[in-house]
Image (cartoon, rainbow, N blue to C red):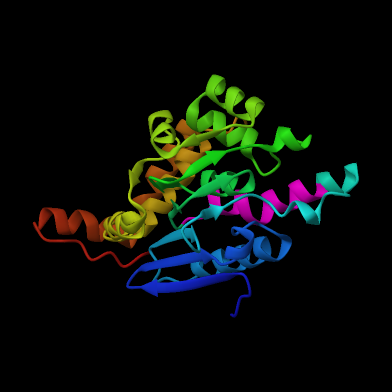
Amino acid sequence: MSYNTILITKKAAIATVTINRPKKLNALNKETIKELHNAFKDLEGDKEVKAIIVTGSGEKAFVAGADISEFANFSVKEGKKLAAKGQEILFDFIENLSTPVIAAVNGFALGGGLELAMSCHFRVASDNAKMGLPEVSLGVIPGYGGTQRLPQLVGKGRAMELIMTAGMISAEQAKSYGLVNHVTTLEELLPLCSKIANKISNNSSVAISYAIKAINAGFKNTVNGYEQEIKAFGACFGTNDFTEGTTAFLDKRKADFPGS
């Protein structure tokens, strides 16, 4: 499949999705959101892909926000639909993907850009990165999950302050808050993400998919995360990956997971 606003590269078991709108600082518009959805859906179905890295083109921005020109004149009904559809086809979609997604945050990650990074399973940032949710300065609030995921990651008080002030924080501050896992140089950002992704790819993709579901369940008020963990744990016993993993351990050899 060909794309106008994103690029996809694959190396071994790792796929990299690059948002490619550098003149717009990789801002998310309807086309980009749809293309990202299609790309992640395709990669999810690719059994050779064990981990996905998402980043922005250039050195200035991961994603500098949503394309405001597309919705500046929207009505209440249109605004609600915009948020609902975006959450469904991209942000919630990524969060619940069974293939691990790492956000390589290079430069600005603001508004919808930070919301995109937060929907990924974890984040690594370059030392020039700046993160924030400035929506209230435009008379609106984060609409792609920002009011929910930011408190989960950094705590209620810090999320309240960041959203209310519409301010930005540095990569190091984001690390101290728990918003990103690692901070490195811009040059080492993708190599570090690839190193982590390769470690992930050595493990059972089936078990990882169950782990993602169980972890996510703990952040949903309507789901008992412990029950989800018990269910997923039991399901693992019926997989070929479990048979291979335990047999390899007992045989004192490296596991070669079949992925089923």
Placement of the C terminus among the 4 image quadrants:
bottom left
Can I make out residue 193 in this image?
Answer: no
Vertical placement of 174 versus 125: above or below? above
Total number of numbered discs in the rendering: 0
199 relative position to 154: left or right: left
Placement of the N terminus among the 4 image quadrants:
bottom right
| Residue 91 sits inside the magenta stretch | yes
Can I make out residue 99 in this image?
Answer: yes
Residue farthest to the top, as pictured: 157
71 relative position to 226: left or right: right
Q: Nearer the viewer, residue 59 or 209?
A: 59
Residue farthest to the bottom, as pictured: 2
Residue pictured at 38% horizontal, 45% vertical: 127
Q: Position of residue 85 (x, y in %)?
A: 74, 53
Q: Position of residue 193 (x, y in %)?
A: 34, 55
Residue farthest to the left, as pictured: 252
Residue pictured at 59% horizontal, 59% vertical: 26
Residue pictured at 20% horizontal, 53% vertical: 246
Q: Position of residue 122 (x, y in %)?
A: 43, 45
Q: Mostly what secondary structure, the magenta segment? A: helix
Q: Position of residue 80 (x, y in %)?
A: 82, 44
Vertical placement of 147 versus 238: above or below? above
* Span of residues in magenta: 81-98
| Residue 12 sits inside the magenta stretch | no
The quadrant where residue 51 appears: bottom left
